[in-house]
Amino acid sequence: MEFPATGRTIEIQSYKHNGTLHRVWEETLILKGTSKEIIGGNDRILVHESDGRVWRTREPAICYFHWEKWFNVIGMIRSDGIHYYCNVGTPFVWDEEALKYIDYDLDIKVLPDMTYNLLDEEEYKEHSRIMNYPAMVDEKVWNGVRELQSWIYQGKGPFAPQFVEQWYERYLFFR
């Protein structure tokens, strides 16, 4: 399987469990693309929502996807430090059209001091009922939440000191 080459601009697409397109991020620049992880960067890009809304991100961001983790992480570079938005969802798939994953509603928002909040539990419960999430998906989702919390606590992966800053420097080099 091929993976997006460093320096290539790709689209990121998230779907819901029932197969409907949820959100599309345009123009993420690949900084590292391997069979295990994809790291990308973007800045003030357009985002298309399934309800037709279109908005632009407000700051530079580094995106982290791992081939076997049930989450992805966006490190947003703001004047007061790095803020993280973590989507709980399936590991990524790359198919030459876009990097894709299924979004399972739960999110973790991490502040620069590494305190965090789990978001959208009610949305997860509602979608689980409506879309009939299988027990295996529920188990994977909650294991993903626990692993993500562990990574935050340990400063692992994209939460490691200087991770976002180093990849942002690389982004500026390619841009």
Image: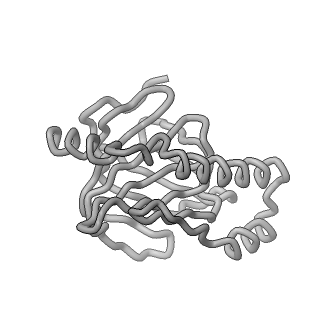
As drawn, the residue found furthest toward the top would be 1
Residue positioned 42% across, 50% down in the render:
12
Residue under the point 39% across and 49% down? 63
Display coloring: one colour
Taking 126 as reference, is 8 left or right?
left
Q: Please, is residue 75 above or below residue 156 in the view?
A: below
26 over 127 or under it: above or below: above
Nearer the observer, 73 or 78: 78
Residue drawn at (26%, 64%) of the image = 59
Q: Residue furthest right?
A: 135
Quadrant occupied by the C terminus: top left
Q: What x and y, as percent, mark residue 25?
A: 38, 57
Horizontal placement of 95 versus 146: left or right? left
Q: Depth check: 106 or 151 in front?
A: 151
The count of marks equals 0
Residue 31, position as x, y percentages in the image:
30, 36
- Residue 57 image offset from top left, x and y in percent: 31, 67
Q: Quadrant of residue 121 in the image?
A: bottom right
**Image position of 70 (left or right of 27):** right
Q: From this view, report whether residue 91 is shown above or below residue 18.
A: above
Residue at image coords 30%, 62%:
81
